[in-house]
Each structure stands twice: as C-alpha cells, then as structure tokens.
Image (tube, rainbow, N blue to C red):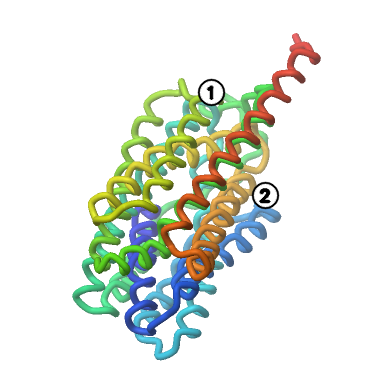
Amino acid sequence: MASFLASLDVATVMTAAPWLVRNDFSGSKSAIGLTGGLGVGTYVLGCLIVGRYGRSLKPKRFVMLSQIIVCVLWASIGFVPRLWMLFALLIVQGLAGSLFWGPMMGWISMGYEGKRLNKRLGMFNLCWSVGGILGCFLGGYLYNVEHWLPFVICSCFAVAVVLFVVRVPAPKCRRQPTGPQVDQPIQNRDLLAYRLMSRIALFTSALGFGVVGAPLAILLGSMSLTAEVHGITGATYALARTFVFFLLVRTTRWHYKGGFLWACQVFAAAMIFAVGFCQVGWQVVVCVGAMGLSAAVMYKSSQFYWGSGGGGKSANLALHEAVAGIGVVTGSIGGGALAEWIGIRRVYPVAAGCMILAVLVETIVRSAQIRRNRVTPTCC
C-alpha cells in the first residue's frame, strides 16, 4: 500500500509539473526537461549515499521521514510564484524520494532469494506500477481543473503513507538467518555478467522513459494537445508495464536469458524511434505505451539480479534505483536541451540509437562471460 500511494503521488506530480512550467511560467524546452530531471538528479545522489551506508539503514524511519518531507513539498509546489522556487522544491523532493524507495525494497526483500524473491519483488512492482497508472490520469485531469489541485491532493497521499507505515512493525535485526523460512543466497557463475547487462539495459530504458516523460509535453504542445493526453499516454505506459510485471511474477523462465533481454531492448528502440514520426495523439499513446512492455523487463531484470546472491540488499537495490535515476535525468534534461538544438522530433531517433548501442555492448559482456566459463570449470 505504501509503494502504491508513493508512486501515485510521484506520477501525479510528474505529469502535471511540466505543464505548470510550460503554461504558468512560460518555460523554455530546456526548463521543461529540467522539471523531469532535477528531482531525479538529487534522487540519484541520495540513492548513492543510501547505497554507501545501506547495511546500517533502519528502513521504517527513513520511509516515514521521506513522506513527511514530501507532504510539505507537494503542498507548496502549486503556489510558488517563481520558477526557481519550483525547481528548488523538486531538488529537495528527489533527496526525500531516495530515503523511500531503496530502503523500502531492502525491507521487503530481507530473507528472500530465488523464486520467493521474484514473487516478493514482483508484487511490490505491481503495487507501485498500478499507482503510476492512476497517477498519470490524475495529474493530467486535475491540472486541467485547477493548476494547483494535483499537488495538494498528492500532499494528502503522503500523509496516508505515513499513517500506514507507522502501523507496520519495524523489521527485526537478523543474525545470519537460517532455516526453512529464510532462503539461502543463490550463487550463479553468470550472475556478475547479468548484473552488468541488466544495469546497462536499465539505464537505456530509463533514458527512454525520461525522453517520453517531461519532454513529451513539448511534442504534445506542438501538436496542440493538452495535459490530459500526456496523462493518458503516461497511464498507458504504466498499464503496459504493470501487465508485464504481473507476467514476470508468475514465471522464472526469463532468468538468465540474454536473448530475451536484448529482444526487449530492440523492441523499445523501435517504439521510441517511431514516436518522432507520430502525427496524431493516438499514435503517441500507442508507441509510448508499447515501450512500457519492455521497460518492465529491463527494470525487473536489474532488480532481480542485484537483489540475488546475498549481501546488503538495501545497498544493492538503492544503487539499482540510482542507475534508473541517472537514465531518467539523462533522458529528461538531455532531451529538453537537445530539443532546443535539433528539434524535439529528432530527439527520439537519437534515444533509439543509444538503446541499440547498449545491446551491442551487452552482447560483448555476455560473450566474455561465456569464454570465461569455458576456461574456468564449475566447482564441485
């Protein structure tokens, strides 16, 4: 429930904020890109800090502190008189978000490995992804009602998260857990290669998400479309992502399958390439929505491989979030800045090229791992 509500308010704000910058502050293309990238940039910084000290985290305290901070921020963001004030609030929000997602994932994955970890993280992903669907709809609809309304509603969501989490028992300290109720770390000699491959895939997928996030308001505005269409587009992306998350919970056949990971990236590259040539709103909705299908695979792959194998799960999964954040920052800020130079429609083929390049790098990583496996015999 906490992840559902937290995702609901973030999706609502991130759908409404670019239009607030575009319409209320007459922001430039670069400013619209900054709207989606500034908060995520500080989120990355926070995730790196959380990852560094992840082994000593007390997740419940961090989760509650995060939502208390964003409650105040969301209540203020719709009423600021200057654009720089809006950007300052988004920067602080990113730091607050880093106190929520990494510790939360570490909390729910404690003592789980293999199939049980896959199911546990899968249900978590379903919750926040459903929140993203509703948040995109709400952001576009509420902004058209009153420009400040989405942000006030989100403040209420943050209060609800605090009230929910305060009733949940804090995770107990585990001393080398053993027994049938706790899964032992699974060791796979391909794990390191798949961790690297999934991180590369996650970065480019997040880059694509960043480009079709805040900068999409530039494209839709040039087509005389409104924030509601932006919300529907984001909701379609989130719906497709949720559907795939549901499928991935029910099977482990995708584990350690490099070809499947690469095919998903090629499909995403084709869809984002097509966005640059869309002429009407429904074409944008279809192409961006289809990207959500493959984005779920890239996200879940990185989450699973870095949550496997023992070690500090909060730290590993905080770094997983940091990589995703770096991709979103690159796509959002870079997309807005690049749109000033070459035009928004040419930004999408550039993003597609980055995705194809990532696949080539991953095939090299996998080939190197296969050669290493032939040289190094499996220990008995």
Query: Which residue lies under the disc numbered 1?
Result: 257
Query: Which residue lies under the disc numbered 2?
Result: 55
Question: Depth check: 187 or 16 in front?
Answer: 16
Residue at left 66%, top 26%? Answer: 366
Q: Which amino acid does label 2 sit on?
A: Arg
Residue at left 45%, top 65%? Answer: 343
Q: Is residue 17 visible?
A: yes
Query: Would you identify the image quadrant in which residue 78 lies?
Result: bottom left
Horizontal relation, residue 258 to residue 18: left or right: right
Question: Depth check: 227 or 11 in front?
Answer: 227
* SS at badge 2: helix
- Label 1 to label 2: alpha-carbon separation: 30 Å
The disc placed on residue 136 is none
Q: Residue 76: give x, y in percent of width and height.
A: 39, 82
Query: Would you identify the image quadrant in which residue 2 lies?
Result: bottom left
Spot the residue most to the bottom: 81
Q: Residue 213: give x, y in percent of width and height.
A: 41, 59
Identify whether 193 is placed above or below 214: above
Question: Depth check: 44 or 209 in front?
Answer: 209
Residue at left 36%, top 35%? Answer: 244
Identify whether 273 is placed above or below 135: above
Residue at left 27%, top 79%? Answer: 147
Q: Earlier in the sequence, mark 1 or mark 2?
A: 2
Q: Residue 48: give x, y in percent of width and height.
A: 65, 57
Q: Which amino acid does label 1 sit on?
A: Lys
Horizontal relation, residue 135 to residue 98: left or right: left
Spot the residue most to the right: 375
Question: Which image quarter holds the C terminus?
Answer: top right
Q: How many labels does the image show?
A: 2
10 Å crowding of disc 2: few (<14), some (14-19), many (20+): some
